[in-house]
Image: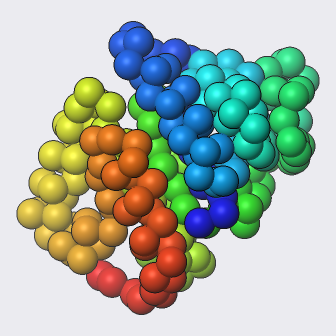
Amino acid sequence: MKRLAVYCGSSMGADPAFADTARALGGEMARRGIGLVYGGGRLGLMGVVADAVLEAGGEAHGVIPQALTDLEVAHRGLTELHVVTTMHERKAKMTELTDAFVALPGGIGTLDELFEAWTWNALGYHAKPFCLLNVHGFWDRMIGFLDDVTGSGFMSPARRGQLLVADGIDAAIDMLDAAAQAGERKMVW
């Protein structure tokens, strides 16, 4: 795995463990030679993970809509900053640049990005794996809800099984790397 897309909040969140994990993830990615692909912002967990990658000597590739650049939230110290017109273009460019996706805690933007990556995978637009990094159980209730969706017959167990879940950074990177290396493109319903 050469590059990993990290979806996360543009705020810090209430638990200091969120920023600590973002910082540690960025450092571990750089240590392993894995470049960061992310939303291009300087604020919140987004800025923390990007700064950690850069401080550890890694590469950080941001993708940000012009409207957010105009609000001066773009990170100006990145290896590469792609400025796009729309959020849809942002997600498409991030998908193009990455080998896998991981979601740290975040809000509606993080959820939107995660579920669109999953949907695009389901439709066969890409075969890239995705994982929740479950910091202090942040994703537990959503995982339970997705299990309920599956139990209610709206998602197959195979589709549900595509969403990897890890409690730690090493586990998340290792699972994603193994899945990316396998590179299987198979439709599951």
The x and y percentages for residue 70 are: 90, 24
Residue 183 seen from this side: yes
Q: Quadrant of the C terminus?
A: bottom left
173 above or below 50?
Answer: below
Q: Nearer the viewer, residue 64 or 31?
A: 31
51 above or below 33?
Answer: above
Residue positioned 84% across, 35% down in the render = 78
- Which color mode does the image show? rainbow
Determine which quarter of the picture holds residue 44.
top right
The x and y percentages for residue 12 are: 52, 16
Residue positioned 11% across, 63% down in the render = 152
Determine which quarter of the picture holds residue 140.
top left
Q: Nearer the viewer, residue 165 or 72?
A: 165
Horizontal relation, residue 148 to residue 183: left or right: left
57 above or below 70?
Answer: below
Residue 85 seen from this side: no
Q: Nearer the viewer, residue 188 or 134?
A: 134
The x and y percentages for residue 50 are: 69, 32
The x and y percentages for residue 127 are: 52, 77
Q: Quadrant of the N terminus?
A: bottom right
User: How many numbered discs?
Assistant: 0
Horizontal relation, residue 75 to residue 109: left or right: right
Residue positioned 68% across, 19% down in the render = 43
Residue positioned 46% across, 21% down in the render = 20
